[in-house]
């Protein structure tokens, strides 16, 4: 499989990416091949359970641009491990522009793919770019308010207060403060669930670091990509886990119902981190490729 290291600029910052070239002509047209633009969710890097999806797309005949956000993985950025929602959305837009410049890619056949936090980013990006051909949103964080509600329900008000206090100290204090991104239930980690760290570590590679700047906790409530969903014109696939305790699957289902573009909603009996490894990764990737075969080569009905 052909995978090249490439870079692109986002607001002057160099972002690192892998470019996979499609291995078949199944999606080829006179204008070129489609390209799937991918990035990870909360704290994730391109080597943390996404390579299997990228390789599946490439085997099916799609190009892939899989990138790290500014400040994460192989990308540059003055503030490391800072989850900057606006910045990450800008990185997606820059990655789309870079994908459109790739040799052999049809610039009007760009597919946005996101998971967890980036599952929301792709909704916002597609709403801003009407040239996007299709959108895949996997276990998406579509609204920060239900996420805060889940933390309150699962861990109590003390955890919310502790996360907020850490965020305030990091943003306004004299010294940087970091938190573990993932940890066991009862820990100070932003995502605290028994088994979550082990699941993520089993899928993650050397680029991933279990650390985020604490200030990101102050922005969760304001991350509401659901407000953009009616502006999306591209066909949309939303996939959720019925056992997800990290983001709200009911909120994602409600968001999908609000979409005015052709939309397919699928749920699976999985938790949030099960999607980054087999057996479920293969199942989900197969459904995604089927969606793209139908969407990029023919008509699709609205569910």
Image (tube, grey):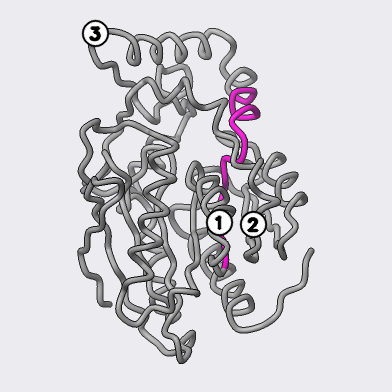
Q: Residue at (56%, 69%) from the top-left corner?
A: 133
* Mark toward the start of the polypeptide (3 vs 1): 1
Q: Is residue 207 above or below residue 152?
A: below
Q: Bin the neighbour count of mark 3 within 10 Å (Cα to Cα): few under 14, some 14-19, many 20 and up.
A: few
- Is residue 140 in the magenta section? yes
Find disc 1 in the rendering and name its residue.
126
Disc marking residue 90: none
Whether 2 is drawn above or below 172: the answer is below
Q: Which residue is mark 3?
A: 174
Find the distance from the CA under tag 1 to the CA under tag 2.
6 Å
Q: State the separation of the CA atoms marked 3 and 2.
A: 42 Å
Towards the viewer: 286 or 251 = 251
Q: What residue range appears in magenta?
A: 134-150
Q: Nearer the viewer, residue 196 or 93?
A: 93
SS category of the residue bearing label 3: loop
In the rendered view, would you say 249 is above or below 289? above
Q: Quadrant of residue 38?
A: bottom left
- What distance separates the C-alpha of mark 3 from that of mark 1? 38 Å
Earlier sequence position, callout 3 versus callout 2:
3
Q: In the rendering, at what x and y percent does residue 44 appear?
A: 36, 43
Classed neighbour count for the residue bearing mark 2: other residues with Cα under 10 Å, few (<14), some (14–19), many (≥20): many
Residue located beneath label 2 in the image? 232
Q: Quadrant of the N terminus?
A: bottom left
State the quadrant of the C terminus. Answer: bottom right
Residue 184 percent location from the top left of the image: 43, 25
Q: Secondary structure at mark 2?
A: loop
Q: Position of residue 34 (x, y in %)?
A: 45, 76
Magenta stretch holds residue 112: no
Q: Are marks 1 and 2 in contact (CB under 8 Å)?
A: yes
User: Residue 19 lies in what quarter of the image?
Assistant: bottom left
């Amino acid at each position: 499989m052909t995978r090249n290291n490439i870079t692109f600029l986002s607001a002057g910052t160099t972002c690192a990416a892998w470019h996979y070239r499609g291995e078949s002509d199944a999606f080829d047209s006179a204008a070129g091949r489609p390209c799937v633009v991918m990035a990870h969710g909360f704290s994730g890097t391109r080597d943390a359970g996404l390579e299997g999806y990228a390789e599946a797309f490439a085997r099916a005949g799609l190009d892939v641009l899989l990138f790290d956000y500014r400040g994460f993985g192989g990308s540059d950025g003055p503030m490391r491990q800072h989850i900057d929602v606006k910045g990450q959305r800008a990185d997606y837009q820059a990655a789309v522009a870079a994908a459109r410049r790739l040799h052999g890619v049809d610039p009007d056949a760009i597919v946005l793919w996101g998971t967890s936090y980036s599952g929301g980013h792709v909704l916002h990006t597609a709403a801003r770019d009407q040239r996007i051909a299709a959108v895949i949103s996997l276990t998406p964080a579509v609204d920060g308010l239900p996420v805060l509600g889940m933390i309150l329900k699962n861990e109590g008000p003390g955890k919310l207060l502790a996360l907020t206090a850490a965020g305030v100290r990091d943003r306004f204090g004299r010294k940087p403060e970091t938190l573990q991104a993932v940890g066991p239930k009862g820990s100070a980690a932003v995502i605290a669930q028994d088994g979550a760290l082990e699941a993520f570590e089993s899928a993650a590679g050397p680029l991933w670091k279990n650390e985020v700047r604490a200030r990101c906790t102050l922005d969760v409530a304001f991350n509401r990509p659901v407000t953009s969903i009616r502006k999306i014109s591209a066909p949309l696939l939303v996939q959720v886990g019925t056992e997800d305790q990290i983001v709200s699957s009911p909120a994602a289902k409600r968001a999908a119902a609000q979409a005015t573009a052709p939309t397919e909603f699928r749920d699976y009996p999985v938790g949030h981190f099960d999607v980054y490894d087999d057996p479920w990764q293969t199942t989900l990737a197969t459904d995604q490729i089927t969606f793209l075969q139908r969407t990029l080569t023919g008509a699709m009905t609205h569910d």
